[in-house]
Each structure stands twice: as C-alpha cells, then as structure tokens.
Amino acid sequence: MKPTLNQLINFCTVAETGNIGKAASKLNISQPPLSRQIAQLETIPRCKAI
C-alpha cells in the first residue's frame, strides 16, 4: 500500500504544527480522523510516522 497525497499533506501539517489538534484545526477536520490517517501511515511497511 502507498500513502495517499492527502495522508502525506496531513502528516506534513502535523509535523509543521507539532500537534495533531492544531493540525486538525488548520486542515479544517476533527482530530480523530486525522489521528486515524496518521495511524494508517504506520501500517505501511518501513514507515514509522511518529
């Protein structure tokens, strides 16, 4: 499985803000779906998101 562009953008926003809550606010989504997307990235082999 490859990460989607949306997942990568969201991951970069979390990295920029340093906080999932702030990133969710900046992306205009709620925190739980953003957390799930980051967790999904970690299911990709050789990918440790945070």
Image: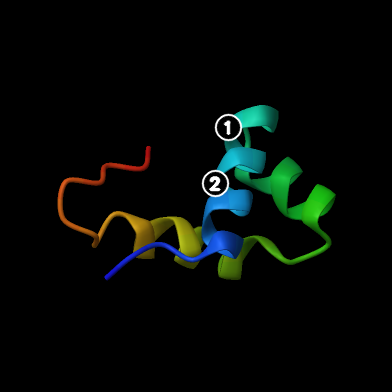
| Residue appearing at x 29%, y 54% in the figure | 42
- Distance from Cα at disc 1 to Cα at disc 2: 6 Å
Specify the label residue 11 is tagged with: 2
Specify the label residue 4 is tagged with: none
Taking the image as shown, residue 7 lies to the left or right of residue 19, namely left
| Residue appearing at x 76%, y 66% in the figure | 29
Specify the label residue 15 is tagged with: 1
Asked if residue 49 can be seen in this view, the reply is yes
Total count of labels: 2
Give residue 17's quadrant in the image.
top right
Q: Does the residue at mark 1 contact the one at mark 2 (Cβ under 8 Å)?
A: yes
Give residue 2's quadrant in the image.
bottom left
**Amino acid under disc 2:** Phe
| Residue appearing at x 27%, y 71% in the figure | 1
Choose between 40 and 20: the one closer to the eye: 40
Taking the image as shown, residue 6 lies to the left or right of residue 39, namely right
Which secondary structure, mark 2? helix
Choose between 4 and 13: the one closer to the eye: 4
Give residue 40's quadrant in the image.
bottom left
**Amino acid under disc 1:** Ala
Choose between 41 and 33: the one closer to the eye: 41
Choose between 5 and 35: the one closer to the eye: 5
Quarter of the figure that contains the C terminus: top left
Taking the image as shown, residue 38 lies to the left or right of residue 19, namely left
| Residue appearing at x 53%, y 60% in the figure | 7
- In the rendered image, residue 13, in percent from the top left (x then y), is placed at 67, 41
Q: Residues within 10 Å of mark 1 (few under 14, many from 20)?
A: some
Taking the image as shown, residue 23 lies to the left or right of residue 9, namely right
- In the rendered image, residue 25, in percent from the top left (x then y), is placed at 81, 52
- In the rendered image, residue 14, in percent from the top left (x then y), is placed at 61, 40
Which secondary structure, mark 1? helix
